[in-house]
Image: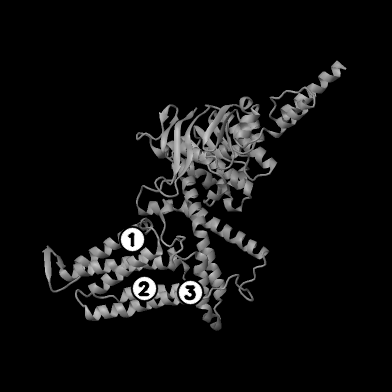
Amino acid sequence: MLKDITMGQFFPGESLLHKMNPSLKIIATVLYIVAVFLCKSAAAFAFIFTITVLIIIVSGVPAKVILRSVRPLIFILVFTTVYNVFFTKGDTLLFSLGFVRVYREGVFNAVLIAVRILCLLVGSSVVLTYTTSPIMLTDGLETLLKPLTWIGVDVHTFAMMMSIALRFIPTLIEETDKIISAQKARGADFESGNLIRRARALIPILVPLFASSIRHAVDLATAMECRCYRGGRGRTKMTTLRPDAADWIVLLFFALLIPAAILLNVYVPFFSI
Amino acid sequence: MGKLEIRDVSYIYGKDTPFEKLALDRVNAEFCDNCITGLIGHTGCGKSTLVQLLNGLLVPTQGKVFLDGQDINAKSVNRRELRFRVGLVFQYPEYQLFEETVQADIAFGPKNMGLDSEETARRVLSALHFVGLDETLLTVSPFDLSGGQKRRVAIAGVMAMQPEVLILDEPAAGLDPIGREEILGGIKSYQRARNSSVIIVSHSMEDMARYSDNIVVMSHGTVTAQGTCRDIFSNHELLTDAGLSIPQVTAFLAALRKNGIDVSKDIFTVDDAVKEIRSYMLRERNRA
């Protein structure tokens, strides 16, 4: 069941986004997120939705993978939609049922916010995590955060910790699966009982998992020390990444999303939230 | 008590995904009642998948698993109760310990069965005895034990459920020779005392020749042979085809035979080999 976790997984490929310089890609993702949040009118949302679909097509990540990553979001989407439909007050009453009043504004809000959440999560994971290997991602982050070293932040160590954490996600998922099976074999019951009982039932999984992550950490630290790892000082990179013209153009494209969204808000302001 | 049987069982990992992998391909096997079956095969041949099918953790994509003639995946069978009847010890079980004391960890299974504390305590003690641990360890945290001791506690945890069939996936992996002997010896004495069925997954021909009564040989997702130790270990070709070898001592005696020393070829343990070579020497002396 844990195998279904796909959000934030790298999907190898050869697309424009895959080849983009990771530092610029992180900036592009931030620009994209800002643009999504700036959308206010239906036209702006339609625009950003189209752009998101376009990005997905360019990235070459199969639609099946994208849809699977949306599945865990369904609860949040349904929840916010219902919330917005029933609890937004407006001018045009569509219908009322007892104390529940549904306004036209509520329905618009619900749809637009659902689109916003969807674009936000799918778009940013396609731009960033699906098309960037964890190593590239931390590399990009390290470059971007480099200025912080001047105020005493150990950026290299931070980046190293990030990449190690990412590296161990699949290992720990596999281990969790194994531990669950083993405790099931001893009659552990995760599916019945009330909330407290179910939470207690997790102890036989969490304790061994915790113990094994500490074990992994200690082993890895020893292995790194054996290979003379001493932290970031004086450490050079095997490959230094330099953005080329194409990278800057893609970044410009993302930067232009922001004025586009604002212009659409202003000039096509129908159904704004 | 407790006879497992599998008929035409196939298992596919990640069915209907791009990562689909056929792990077992129409496997048929029988695991003997009241005795120890050794399940041997090269790495990745599907042994570990097979054992998880035997207690219902995995459901076969196709085919059926029977316990005492009953289909274990039938709707009428309670999964959880089935797992108390077919106990499974995973590979490296020491990483599954979680309780504060050894006593509590071994008692986890019996408690889940709903046994009272008296019966639980009795079973914990008896399981502890079989794996050769001292009673003074009962109050110790399992995380303070050595690797070998942790392994024993984990095995005791499943033994304490007193399943009809006890399955162990590589119980002796990564242990030194003395540790191997003690664990496998403990399992054997448990089996003899409880009169239950035991299935041991192993890589080691030597261990299996010594401790098991029957052997099931797996290769590339299928069972290629099953029979008594004698049947299997005297068939050199069969084992080589499965990516395995005959026990070293059998190979040694075969080499002796090649050099004109007339010893039996059906010897699979060192003890028997010593006897055989002794009797050969006596025979030779008498002739001279």
| Res. B199 image quadrant | top right
- Residue drawn at 64 percent across, 76 percent down: A234
N-term mark: 2 or 3: 3
**Cα gap from disc 2 to disc 1, whole angstroms:** 17 Å
Q: Nearer the viewer, mark 2 or mark 3?
A: 3
Q: Is residue B24 left or right of residue B138?
A: left
Q: Nearer the viewer, residue B54 or B203?
A: B203
**Label 3 SS:** helix
| Res. A50 image quadrant | bottom left
| Res. A126 image quadrant | bottom left
Residue type (three-letter) at the residue carrying disc 3: Ser
Instruction: Give the image location of residue A199, x and y in percent.
Output: 40, 54
Report the residue marked by disc 1.
Answer: A73
Furthest residue toward right: B288
**Cα gap from disc 2 to disc 3, whole angstroms:** 16 Å
Residue type (three-letter) at the residue carrying disc 1: Leu
**Cα gap from disc 3 to disc 1, whole angstroms:** 28 Å
Can the viewer see residue B83?
Answer: no
Instruction: Give the image location of residue B79, x and y in percent.
Output: 40, 39
Report the residue marked by disc 2.
Answer: A33
Q: Nearer the viewer, mark 2 or mark 1?
A: 2
Q: Which mark is residue A23?
A: 3
Q: Is residue B163 left or right of residue B265?
A: left
The answer to whether dots 2 and 1 both sit on one chain is: yes
Instruction: Give the image location of residue B189, x and y in percent.
Output: 61, 32
Badge 3 crowding class, 10 Å Cα cut-off, few under 14, some 14 to 19, many 20 or more, is: many
Q: Which mark is residue A196?
A: none
